[in-house]
Image (cartoon, coloured by chain):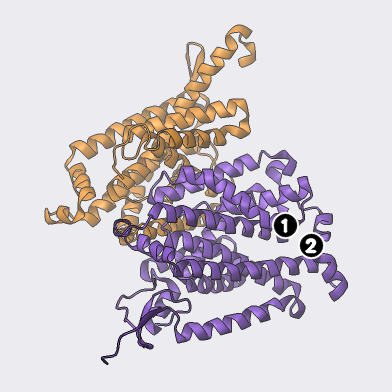
Amino acid sequence: MRSTRPISGRASMNIIDTLVQGILLGGLYALFAAGLSIVFGIMRLVNLAHGDLIIFAAFAILTITSMFGLNPFLSALIAAPLMFAAGWLLQYFLLNRTLGKDILPPLLVTFGLSIIIQNGLLEGFAADSRRVPLGSLEAATIPLGAVNIGVMPLLTFLSAIVVIVGLNTLIYRAPIGRAFRATSDDPVTAGLMGIRPQRIFATATGLAMVVVTVAALYLGTRANFDPSAGPSRLIYAFEAVIIGGLGSLWGTLVGGVVLGVAQTIGATINPEWQILAGHIAFLAVLAFKPRGFFPRAVD
Amino acid sequence: MSSTAQTWTTKTGTRASGLFGIAAILVVIVAAAAPFLVSRDIVQDLFFILTMLVLAQNWNLLAGYAGLLSIGQQAFVGFGAYSMFGMVILLGVDPLLATLLAGFFAVLLAIPSGFFSFRLQGAYFGVGTWVIAEAVRLVVAQWKALGGGTGTSLPGEARKAMFGVDFLKNTFDMKTSQASDAIAYWFALVLAAATVLLFYRILRTRQGLGLAAVRDNETAARALGVNAQRMKVFVYLTTAFVTGITGALIYLQKARISPDAAFSVTDWTAYVLFIVVIGGIGTIEGPIVGMIVFFVLQKTLSDFGSVYLLILGFIGIATMIFAPAGLWGLFSAHTGIQLFPVRRRLVLNGSDHTLQDTRKGGFNG
């Protein structure tokens, strides 16, 4: 451990170690943020239940894992289509009714949804902290020079990159992406071209829920979670989106990394300052670069 | 039409609003006597109703009129309450005076808070205010002199020495706890009445008209010379002031504070949103109606814990989808009754030519 390293190199090693951990943590926050970002990008909908949906998905993965004794990765593979369906139905039957010029209905309905999911989970699973068991992979590390890189944090970060590349390809290359962008620009005209905006929106939220499932897999295997953990995940996702710049998926990765590094640096100074340091980084970006690092959307 | 010169004035009051005004004054007078008439439990219930009503009126002015969808009002509740505790415990200020001064501390917080959150638009403004409230909670939890993360209690001597307690004890033979509850209750009654009157006044002025215009169509309002941003800043700071005082008052009565409770998003924002939405956003009557519904629900369902919140969530969503103008909106649309009318009507030659409003729904103004 740290105390066995020679004194002279310890400080710089610690800094590198902290930075690496922070960057990898940023991958998790980028996964939180990507789902929020596509829903906002396509529907101009800020889903306040986003964090609670992540926790909901984590409980789904946990349930499948313990019920069938499956590997969590396999459980996530099963949970993903279920979450897609849940997201599709949620958007089609509830959230679509709230979309319009007035931003109050979607905000209040998703806030209500957040409270329903939190208390529903509390009823179903009690307030205990849970964790998705991963066996030997949990503590596995790869020695890379002086720093040890955890296998799971590395997988998280790589998954974030894969998800972002995948989403960008889908949105900018695939026919469904063209429909997303057309509906986002002008749902009425898109409707005249044979697109059904209601279904496109439902598909987009379904897709976001698949990303949410990926985020939930890495959240649930990395740390403890409980039914009330959703709002903090929403806040991290939101901070990553704003730091990165609205509308840019690569921006969410940058935002996630900035947030992750700020939090790990804060935690090394004083463990109680971890979350606060993230908020301060967010406020600093808001003060000096209010549109984030890679703004794309005009609004 | 007669050929005589036409003189005209504008008028906002109606017969219903006049009668209601008289009834409201009577209700306030009767309510003021409550500590002498009913048990301490009921006084505490009334205190809860009044303070939540003030919070609801504040959020209503923010969201329903200025379009500022804050989810971070718990920042001002918590900071107001903590600054009151700080003044009492560290500086020995009288608790009642400290509660009033807490409003100024809330404004001091609102200035930097607004600097950050006003850079975000729409729903993102809301989440931004929530982040700020979280950051303030984490900073306050580091304040070791006030108990850090576990919180602290208001010293018993400070409550005993509070302005008015001795007088009530000697004159009406009250116990200390009874006397300080009564004082907190009267404070809440005055605060609630003053808030409703102040906001009603604001809405009836030119500025209030501008506010409604900004809410309905910001671009058009700006084109007509309404300074939308200045109106929003004014409302943001005013509501921070009142919310800060209310937070301090609530914790003056509770006499025990912790960061998690004082900065709770459920207690000070989710409940408040529910009250405003169920009653009818964008009217002064709405939060009053919503508060009554919320109190009844809480009394009957709060033993069920998380199921209670689940039900509140479902009711809130159903209201937003099926009756976005809330209960008061439904009532007002059917009967045309408004207890706090803000619409100006033209009165020609002394006779009332009411311009009928053909819009459906609950928004007035």
Q: The N terminus of chain B appears in which quarter of the rendering?
A: bottom left
Q: How many marks?
A: 2
Q: Chain of mark 2?
A: B
Give me the residue at 57% from left, 67% from top.
B195
Q: Which chain is orange?
A: A
Q: Which mark is residue B287?
A: none
Q: Report the residue that reaches farthest toward the left.
A: A193
Which residue is labeled 2 in the image?
A: B163
Q: Secondary structure at mark 2?
A: loop
Tell which circle, 2 or 1, labels the residue nearer the N-terminal end: 1
- Residue A216 makes an appearance in the image: no
Q: Residue at x 39, y 82 (%)?
A: B336
Locate residue A85 relative to residue B104 in the image: left or right. Answer: left
The spot of residue B243 in percent (x, y) is: 58, 58
Q: Secondary structure at mark 1?
A: helix
Q: Which residue is mark 1?
A: B97
- On the same chain, marks 2 and 1? The answer is yes
Q: Amino acid at mark 1?
A: Leu
Residue A161 x/y as whole percent: 34, 29
Q: Nearer the viewer, residue A129 or B77?
A: B77
- Please identify the quarter of the rendering in which residue B66 is found: bottom left
A68 in relation to B73, above or below: above
Q: Position of residue B109 (x, y in %)?
A: 57, 46
Q: Where does residue A214 sit, x and y in percent of width and height?
A: 39, 38
Asked whether disc 2 touches disc 1, contact meaning CB atoms under 8 Å apart, the reply is yes
Q: Is residue B364 left or right of residue B297?
A: left
Front-most of B210 and A20?
Answer: B210
Q: Which chain is purple?
A: B
**Amino acid carrying mark 2 in the image:** Phe
Please give the chain letter of the residue carrying mark 1: B
Q: In this view of the protein, which residue sits in the foreground, A67 or B191?
A: B191
